[in-house]
Image (tube, rainbow, N blue to C red):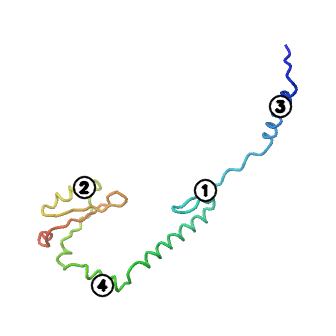
Amino acid sequence: RVVVMPSEEAEKRVARAARFAADAAKPPPPIPKRTYAWEGGAITSNKEEARKAFFERQRALKAAAQAEAPAPAAAQEVAAAGREDDESTSKKLFVGNLAFKTSTKTLAGLFEKSSSATIARDRGRPRGFGFVTFDSAADASA
């Protein structure tokens, strides 16, 4: 049995086969470059450029924060004015070498006369130490 196709359809098939053969002969496309994007920065394929831009932004933020900060003499005056008497500074007790699973309730429970307890955390994880604040310096020293 012989199938006869119209000439237009046969020409389309031949042209399509030629396109496939031409595509197969081409070299594969190059591997895409890795792209880097730093927080608040544009996407780039140059790692060094991205790193430089990142550190430039960090320096600019640090300079802006320092420009907004009060002068050292003024900062000392503010600290002295805000500081209460020496007795109040001794109301806070440092507690170190805590287990990471220690909670603030457990820490406050260990000290009966404490008014509050806090555990230092870094990114939500305990750092192994905390502070207990007492109502009076006499309670803290007892």
Q: Residues within 10 Å of mark 2 (few under 14, many from 20)?
A: some
User: In the rendered structure, which amino acid carries the disc numbered 2?
Assistant: Ser
Task: Name the residue beneath numbered marker 4.
Answer: 77
Distance (Cα) linking label 3 and label 2: 76 Å
Q: Amino acid at mark 1?
A: Thr
State which tag comes first along the sequence, 4 or 2. Answer: 4
* Dot 4 and dot 3 residues touching (CB under 8 Å): no
Q: CA distance from mark 4 to mark 2?
A: 37 Å
Q: Which residue is at a point 81% across and 37% down the rendered structure image?
A: 21
The residue labelled by disc 2 is 103
Identity of the amino acid at label 3?
Lys
Crowd class of label 3 (few under 14; some 14 to 19; many from 20; radius 10 Å): few
Q: Is residue 49 left or right of residue 76?
A: right
Q: Residue 31, position in %: x, y?
A: 68, 50
Residue 98: name its quadrant: bottom left
The location of residue 24, given as percent across then percent down, is 78, 39
Q: Earlier in the sequence, mark 4 or mark 3?
A: 3
Q: Which mark is residue 35?
A: 1
Instruction: Give the labeled residue for mark 3.
Output: 12
Is 59 positioned to the left or the right of 82 in the image?
A: right
Depth check, mark 4 against mark 3: the one in front is 3
Report the mark closest to the observer, 1 or 2: 1
- Mark 3 lies on a secondary structure that is helix
Q: Earlier in the sequence, mark 3 or mark 1?
A: 3
The residue mark sitting in front, 3 or 1, is 3
